[in-house]
Image (cartoon, grey):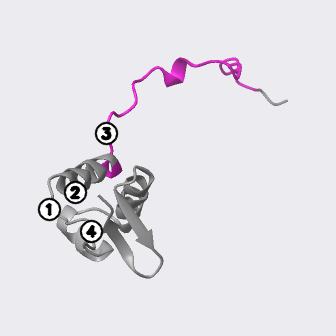
């Protein structure tokens, strides 16, 4: 004869109790976006100038390539940079 230990009853899919913790307000990508956008707005990069390479940004900011790529994509979506395949990103302000 086998015995089964009764566990807690399964929760319905609509149960949101585990989601009640606040989300992290900031992440690395947001911080990189803010820093680069600030530099662009302050004129650190002239309009049309090329941004540093992914490798240079990774080293300077201490983040992964994925973070840099997501940040550049966010800046592109905001209209702050333009990208061309094989040419990198440039300031579009």
Callout 1 secondary element: loop
User: How packed is label 1: few (under 14 Cα within 10 Å), some, or many (20 or more)?
Assistant: some
Q: Relative to 38, say whether 25 is above or below.
A: above
**Could you tell me residue 79's position as x and y percent?**
39, 53
Residue lying furthest bottom: 86
Q: Quadrant of residue 51?
A: bottom left
Mark 2 or 4, nearer chain start: 2
Judged from the image, the secondary structure of the residue bearing numbered disc 4 is helix
Cβ–Cβ under 8 Å for marks 2 and 4:
no
**Gap in Å between the C-alphas at discs 2 and 3?**
20 Å
Residue 10, disc: none
Q: Which residues are magenta?
A: 4-29
Image quarter (top left, top right, bottom left or bottom right) of the N terminus: top right
- Residue at position x 54%, y 17% in the image: 17
Residue 92 % position (x, y):
33, 62
Mark 3 vs mark 4: which is more N-terminal? 3
Mark 2 or 3 closer to N-term?
A: 3
Given this view, does label 3 or label 1 mark the residue nearer the observer? 1
Disc tally is 4
Spatial CA distance of label 2 from label 4 is 17 Å
Query: Mark 4 against mark 1, which lies toward the viewer?
Result: 1
Q: What's the mark number on residue 40?
A: 2
Farthest residue, direction right: 1
Q: Is residue 70 left or right of residue 14?
A: left
Determine the residue positioned at 45% across, 52% down: 77
Q: Is disc 3 surrounded by few (<14), some (14 to 19) or many (20+) residues within 10 Å?
A: few
Q: Which residue is mark 3?
A: 26
Q: CA distance from mark 2 to mark 1?
A: 6 Å
The foreground one among 61 and 83 is 83
Would you identify the image quadrant in which residue 48 lies?
Answer: bottom left
Magenta span includes 85: no
């Amino acid at each position: 004869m086998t015995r089964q230990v009764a566990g807690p009853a399964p929760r319905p899919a609509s149960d949101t109790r585990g989601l009640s913790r606040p989300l992290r307000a900031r992440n690395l990508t947001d911080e990189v976006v803010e820093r680069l956008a600030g530099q662009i707005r302050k004129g650190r990069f002239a309009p049309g100038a090329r941004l540093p390479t992914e490798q240079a940004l990774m080293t300077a900011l201490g983040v992964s390539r994925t973070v840099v790529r997501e940040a550049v994509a966010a800046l592109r979506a905001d209209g702050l940079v333009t990208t061309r395949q094989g040419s990198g990103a440039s300031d579009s302000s």
